[in-house]
Image (spheres, helix red, strand yellow):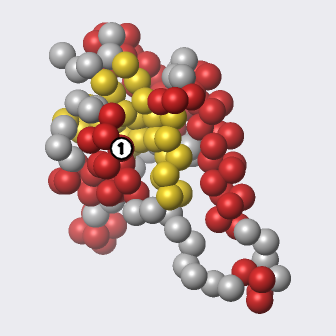
Amino acid sequence: MYKHILFATDLSDESDYIVSKVRGMCDYTKAKLSIIHVVEPMPGYSYAYLGIEDIEGQLIEESRTALAKLGETLSVDTKNQYVEIGPTKSKIQAVAAQIGADLIICGSHGRHGLSLLLGSTANAILHGAKCDVLTVRLPEAE
C-alpha cells in the first residue's frame, strides 16, 4: 500500500472537498503526507514601469500562508509543505520524485469539449508521473 502521498492543491475553496478524500486515504493507508502548491510564474512585465508592486511575490507569500493553514488542518509538518514556482506539472512531478512519493492526489474539474482536448493540470500530472496518480472529481456546481 502507499507509504508517501503528495497532495497537489490549487488552494481554492473547492479543495475542501478533496481534503476529506486525502484525509481518508491517509487514514486508510497510514501513509506519510506532504502537500504542494505551485505558483505559475507571471509574464515578464516591468512592474516598476507599470506602477505595480511585486504581484508574484505577494502570490507566493499568500500561498505559503494558505498552505501552512492547510498543513495545520491535515497535520502536515512544515518541512513537508512545498510552495514551488514554475510550470505546475513539472514542479509537482519533480517534488514527488524528490520526496519519494508513491501517490499524487489532485483534483479534477471534469471539463468537457475544448478544455478536455487541451488537457488539464490533473491530466498533465497523470501522463508524466513516475508514481500512481489519484484524481478526485470535484462535485459540479448546482
Decide if residue 105 is in sight here: yes
Q: Residue at x 54, y 23 (%)?
A: 77
> Looking at numbered disc 1 in the image, what kind of residue is underneath it?
Val
Q: Is residue 4 left or right of residue 39?
A: left
Mark 1 Cα within 10 Å, few/some/many (few <14, many 20+)? some
Label 1 secondary element: helix
Which residue is at 40% across, 63% downward?
87
Q: Which residue is drawn at the image coordinates 52% and 68% (left, top)?
A: 41
Residue 75 picture location, percent across and down: 54, 18
Is residue 18 in view?
no
The quadrant where residue 32 appears: top left
Q: Nearer the viewer, residue 70 or 138?
A: 70
Residue found farthest to the right: 51
The quarter of the picture where residue 24 lies is: top left
Depth check, front residue: 5 or 122: 5
Tell whether 11 sits left or right of 87: right
- Residue placed under numbered mark 1 in the picture: 95
Quadrant of the drawing holding the N terminus: top left
Give x and y (percent) for residue 56: 65, 65
* Most foreground residue, 59 or 28: 59
Place of residue 4 in the rendered image (x, y in percent of width and height, measured from the top left): 31, 24
Q: Position of residue 117 (x, y in %)?
A: 24, 68
Q: How many marks?
A: 1
Residue at 31 percent of width and 49 percent of height: 94
